[in-house]
Amino acid sequence: MTELELKRDLFGSVFLVLDDAGRPLHVCRDTRTARAWVMPLARWLARREARALRRLEGVGAVPRLIDHRAGMLSREWLAGEPMQRARPADPHYFRDALTLLRRLHLHRVVHNDLAKEPNWLVTPEGLPALVDFQLAWAARRRGRLFRALAHDDLRHMLKHKRSYLPGRLTARERRILATPSVLSRAWMASGKKVYLFVTRRILNWSDREGAGDRRF
């Protein structure tokens, strides 16, 4: 087996493990290489990802958690192209994406990062799959906060449908797009500006890094 580094930043490194024939086996996120002053945050994000993937075991179209210990998280590699490269134009893709989101939410998991096209894959069969669960939340119950975040998961998926298939949006989907949650409105009004200032000006880090190709 060999290891191919995909990404390295303040929060550690991500590498792909290949078998002897060069085929992808699994992805590892190593927080042991994170900068000391952000290591607690890096490990907290890895714990969130592990918790969500455990909750979603058997759901399908999300990576299977292989191991999480000693600052290392290993998860299944999913074959597919990121949305911005595959540019899905089949209405069935977005119908199946809705079904996938419903499965996540039935398991009391919200992804919280679906505005990013690289987190949506188009599999070789043309089906949707999701990756990068660092910001996901495995909730104890489906309370008001959970429902608001689930609504925003759905809105972000529909924004992608609007980009690729604007003529196939239903009247109900247009209403959902027109009604962001209170959390989403607050984020756009102030939270996002603070986030961008901290990540780009202070940390000199952009979460869009790698968006042009399949990174992890």
Image: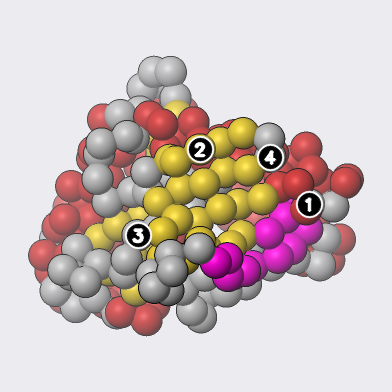
The rendered magenta stretch, by its main secondary structure, is classed as: strand
Residue 147's disc number: none
Query: x%, y% of residue 128?
Result: 25, 60
For label 3, the crowd category at 10 Å Cα-Cα, with few meaning under 14, some 14 to 19 and many 20 or more, is many
Name the residue at the left extreme. Answer: 92
Q: What amino acid does circle 2 point to?
A: Asp
Q: Are marks 3 and 1 in contact (CB under 8 Å)?
A: no
Q: Nearer the viewer, residue 182 or 120?
A: 120
Name the residue tied to disc 1.
34
Question: Looking at the image, which is closer to me, 93 or 174?
Answer: 93
* Of pointers 3 and 1, the one earlier in the residue sequence: 1
Say if 164 sits above or below 180 in the image.
below
Label 3, on which residue? 78
Residue 46 on image: x %, y % = 61, 41
Q: SS of the residue at dot 3?
A: loop
Element under label 2?
strand
Q: Disc 1 and disc 2: Cα gap in Å?
A: 19 Å
Q: Which residue was labeled with disc 4?
A: 71
Between circles 2 and 3, the one closer to the viewer is 2
Type of amino acid at the residue the image marks with label 3: Leu
Q: CA distance from mark 2 to mark 3?
A: 16 Å
At horizontal 41% and vertical 31% (from top left) the residue drawn is 54
> What residue type is disc 1 on?
Ala
Check disc 2: other Cα within 10 Å, few if <14, some if 14-19, many if 20+: few
Q: Label 2: which residue?
A: 67
Res 179 visible: no
Around disc 4, counting alpha carbons within 10 Å, would you say few (fewer than 14), some (14 to 19), or many (20 or more)? some
| Mark 2 / mark 3, whichever is N-terminal | 2
Of labels 1 and 2, earlier in sequence is 1
Residue at (27, 51) in percent of width and height:
61
Instruction: Determine the CA span between mark 4 and mark 1.
Output: 10 Å
